């Protein structure tokens, strides 16, 4: 098949992902709020006269800023009487669909769905307004079947979803080993098995996959089942930093409610500062919110190593997002995108300046 046809087919598959995922898991579940600190304070005033702001995030530790900020009531304090309404999602495409339909206003999300959402709307639906986390992604394998990186060839490796951030990263890494893999079917010198993070540990236990390139806490769940970390993705990046979670907003919401967006960003900056100053308490708060959202907390042998591998940061690490887009193009999952305008970091830099923190950079991809 000609390369141009493969690229078009890849785009068609990615374009269908939001609808397919939406049908599978809906817009996400409303998060349960059992922390009294998150209640609206008496006498507080609404910001921009807005009754509520709808915030989306995943039930992943890489979305720890959102988990902790909701659990500790930091976002609610920053928003006064404008109520925080959180919603939990299983995958990026469904969160982008929710953003497009105005079911959420602001969301924590990975770089690949942010890139896809921006490019498919011709740059009209979202902006990245801040960073949240770096790292927290690992290649975990069955040590009985895979003892070195070269042994990955010929094996079955799970990624969370076709075209998602980890899928792109694994396809790019495989290509750098000189291996050929069809990006849509996942077949080739190594077989890529697209598997929801919730079921990947069971797939590993059953032997249907030999390993997985996955975010936390799935990676540490596999280790708890006897898997071995063969590669930490952070080692592939300069300074071991790469964006794993961004903050996005609907462009119309940003235009109509800039003070609300600033308040959410203030809450995010305060949350990250608290996380980095209080790692153990923050880890416990994130786990408590995971339990509130899903009904099940993570055991210590999963929670502890997973939390240690994630770095929480306000910096969106914009240059690494551009690199991840290039990886998707090389993999045949995306035509070369025009990402100029995907960032609007002015609100975040205003908050950082007020906090006495240095400004962050958009790598030339900001609004004009």
Image (spheres, helix red, strand yellow):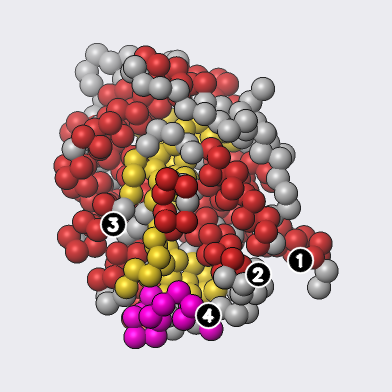
- Say which label, 3 or 2, has the lower sequence index: 2
| SS at circle 1 | helix
Mark 4 and mark 3 in contact (Cβ < 8 Å)?
A: no
Indicate yes or no whether the magenta region holds residue 143.
Answer: yes
Front position among marks 4 and 1: 4
Choose between 65 and 229: the one closer to the eye.
229
Mark 1 and mark 2 in contact (Cβ < 8 Å)?
A: yes
Residue at horizontal 39 percent and vertical 60 percent from the top: 232
Report the Cα–Cα distance between label 3 and label 4. Answer: 26 Å
Give the quarter of the image for residue 208: bottom left
**Mark 1 — residue?**
6
Residue at horizontal 47 percent and vertical 36 percent from the top: 316
Choose between 27 and 366: the one closer to the eye.
366
Front position among marks 3 and 2: 3
Mark 1 Cα within 10 Å, few/some/many (few <14, many 20+)? some
Residue at horizontal 67 percent and vertical 22 percent from the top: 368
What range of the chain is rendered magenta?
141-154
Residue 103 sits above or below residue 256 on the image: below
């Amino acid at each position: 098949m000609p390369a141009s046809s493969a690229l078009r087919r890849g785009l068609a598959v990615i374009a269908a992902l939001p609808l397919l995922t939406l049908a599978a898991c809906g817009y996400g579940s409303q998060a349960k709020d059992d922390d009294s600190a998150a209640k609206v304070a008496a006498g507080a005033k609404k910001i921009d006269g807005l009754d509520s702001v709808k915030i989306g995030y995943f039930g992943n530790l890489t979305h720890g800023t959102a988990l902790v900020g909701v659990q500790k009531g930091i976002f609610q304090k920053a928003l006064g009487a404008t109520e925080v309404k959180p919603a939990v999602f299983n995958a990026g495409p469904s969160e982008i669909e929710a953003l497009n339909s105005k079911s959420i206003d602001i969301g924590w999300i990975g770089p690949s769905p942010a890139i896809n959402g921006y490019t498919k709307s011709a740059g009209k639906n979202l902006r990245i307004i801040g960073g949240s986390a770096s790292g927290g992604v690992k290649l975990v394998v069955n040590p009985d079947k895979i003892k070195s990186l070269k042994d990955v060839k010929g094996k079955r490796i799970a990624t969370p979803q076709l075209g998602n951030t980890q899928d792109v990263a694994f396809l790019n890494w495989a290509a750098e080993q000189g291996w050929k893999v069809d990006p849509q079917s996942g077949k080739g010198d190594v077989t890529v098995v697209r598997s929801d993070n919730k079921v990947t540990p069971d797939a590993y236990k059953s032997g249907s996959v030999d390993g997985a390139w996955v975010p936390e806490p799935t990676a540490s769940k596999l280790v708890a089942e006897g898997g071995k970390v063969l590669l930490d993705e952070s080692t592939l990046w300069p300074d071991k930093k790469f964006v794993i979670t961004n903050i996005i907003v609907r462009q119309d919401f940003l235009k109509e409610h800039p003070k609300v967006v600033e308040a959410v960003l203030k809450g995010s900056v305060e949350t990250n500062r608290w996380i980095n100053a209080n790692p153990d308490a923050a880890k416990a708060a994130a786990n408590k919110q995971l339990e509130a959202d899903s009904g099940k907390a993570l055991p210590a042998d999963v929670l502890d190593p997973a939390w240690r591998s994630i770095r929480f940061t306000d910096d969106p690490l914009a240059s690494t997002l551009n690199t991840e887009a290039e990886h998707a193009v090389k993999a045949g999952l995306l035509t070369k995108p025009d990402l100029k305008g995907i960032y609007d970091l002015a609100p975040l830099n205003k908050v950082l300046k007020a906090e006495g923190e240095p400004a962050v950079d958009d790598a030339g991809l900001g609004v004009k």
